[in-house]
């Protein structure tokens, strides 16, 4: 069976995966880019154009970052990772944050209370819009993924909902040594989930702590 | 000038330093002993009688644990670390949790809205009861400490108040891979304090992540 994975999901030391006041220009709100600074210099992110002309790093940050897309057949994301603000869409061709060639190169299931027709963009990314709870969305995504894995791409509440429903097999969290003070907390309402996982941690010279959660056999 | 230090302060992955429902029998509430399991096998804690007849460990957990009392002339603790439940004391000789020979062996300043006469116990520990805000409590503690350092011993809200007042010079936090879900959060209201510190992290085979905060020069 294909696995359900979370990668490169970054939180502050006080547990926020997104800051307050998300806007179109500031997808992470008052957090700005601080939660992802560790990732930008990696080979994986420089190859996506995130760090100018710098050569990418090959250390422990890259070791984790590079796993995000290998073997993944579909991403599930929350509405807020597609575009900010709730409510109806401006129009059916509106691409939110992701531009003409999104970095996913697979189908992407966007969870929203405002379904619309699929949006096919170049490079192999097609956004499917679905109004469904986690287990149902996962069944839908499995159809699209074939025997490949499914990535839960975020945002914070989407990851939390899939954890809460016990649908996550592997999870990589990067804990960044900043205190955001406000925003959306990843860990709320998840008391005791450590019992379902083998948890490892490793530090990086960049200052982040990489945590991995591997689901124990039932 | 003597330094203000926090040692062996343990929090869950979701940031709780104490669980809910603290009672006389359960000082950490529903967290039980889970936040301190990493420390019990260390030489420092076995020497205090926490781990039966086991020989104490000498690894990274011990390296951090052992620093707690060296060079410390006084501890400041919150009322809830002396004994649970608010309100007046049962009587002036009541020793709360700490028994006839507390492990501190120095003066201890207990912050409380119900001052009472000092309580002198064997082994060099004298509890002084003081109703004062952090800066004032620190001035009082410095008189008792001479040129030695001052430890902020907890609980959670006491550490948070001293951090908030920018009175902490060094802090060691152990992050334990459990999700308590509820209790008292260490990091609330401390947005941006990382700018005042050099922060390091190191993992331990026991599964905890040791974080150290060293205050930057003004």
Image: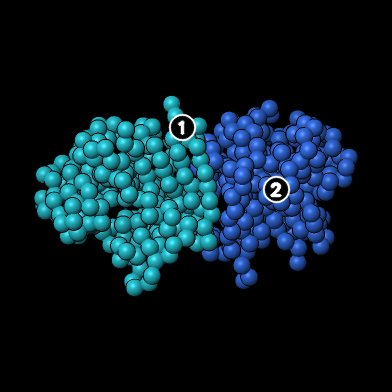
Chain colours: A cyan, B blue
Asked where in the image residue B1 lies, by quadrant, the reply is bottom right
Chain assignment, label 1: A
Residue B9 visible? yes
**Badge 2: few (under 14), some or many (20 or more) residues near its Cα, within 10 Å?**
some
Percent across and percent down for residue A111 are: 24, 41
Residue A133 visible? no
Percent across and percent down for residue A105 are: 23, 52
Question: Marks 2 and 1: CB-CB under 8 Å?
Answer: no
- Residue at mark 1: A216
Q: Look at 84% across and 37% down and name the residue there.
A: B101
Q: Which of A130 and B107 is in front in this view?
A: A130
**Residue A175 vs residue A29: left or right?**
right
Q: Look at 32% across and 50% down and name the residue there.
A: A69
Image quarter hosting the C terminus of chain A: top left
**Badge 1: few (under 14), some or many (20 or more) residues near its Cα, within 10 Å?**
few
Question: SS of the residue at dot 1?
Answer: loop
**Residue A166 vs residue B68: left or right?**
left
Q: In this view, does B113 lie above or below A11?
A: above
**Residue A211 vs residue B19: left or right?**
left
Percent across and percent down for residue B48 are: 79, 39
Percent across and percent down for residue B190 are: 52, 55
Q: How many numbered tags mark residues here? A: 2
Q: Nearer the viewer, residue B102 or B141?
A: B102
Q: Look at 74% across and 55% down and name the residue there.
A: B150
Image quarter hosting the N terminus of chain A: top left
**Residue A168 vs residue A194: left or right?**
left
Measured in 3D between alpha carbons, the distance from the residue under mark 2 to the one under mark 1, in whole angstroms, is: 28 Å
Question: SS of the residue at dot 2?
Answer: loop
- Residue at mark 2: B59
Q: Nearer the viewer, residue A214 or A173?
A: A214
Q: Is residue B27 above or below residue A8?
A: above
């Amino acid at each position: 069976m294909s696995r359900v994975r979370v990668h490169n999901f970054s939180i502050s030391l006080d547990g926020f995966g997104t800051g307050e006041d998300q806007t179109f220009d500031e997808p992470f709100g008052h957090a700005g880019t601080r939660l992802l600074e560790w990732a930008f210099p990696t080979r994986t992110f420089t190859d996506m154009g995130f760090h100018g002309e710098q050569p990418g790093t090959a250390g422990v940050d890259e070791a984790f970052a590079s796993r995000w897309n290998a073997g993944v057949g579909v991403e599930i994301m929350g509405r807020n990772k597609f575009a900010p603000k709730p409510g109806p869409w401006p129009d059916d061709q509106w691409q939110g944050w992701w531009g003409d060639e999104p970095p996913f190169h697979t189908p992407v299931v966007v969870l929203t209370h405002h379904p619309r027709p699929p949006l096919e963009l170049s490079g192999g990314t097609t956004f499917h819009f679905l109004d469904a709870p986690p287990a149902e969305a996962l069944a839908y995504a499995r159809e699209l993924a074939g025997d490949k894995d499914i990535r839960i791409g975020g945002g914070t509440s989407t990851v939390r909902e899939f954890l809460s429903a016990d649908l996550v097999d592997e999870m990589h969290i990067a804990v960044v040594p900043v205190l955001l003070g406000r925003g959306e907390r990843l860990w709320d309402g998840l008391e005791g989930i450590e019992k379902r996982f083998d948890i490892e941690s490793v530090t990086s010279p960049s200052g982040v702590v990489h945590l991995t959660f591997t689901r124990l056999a039932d």
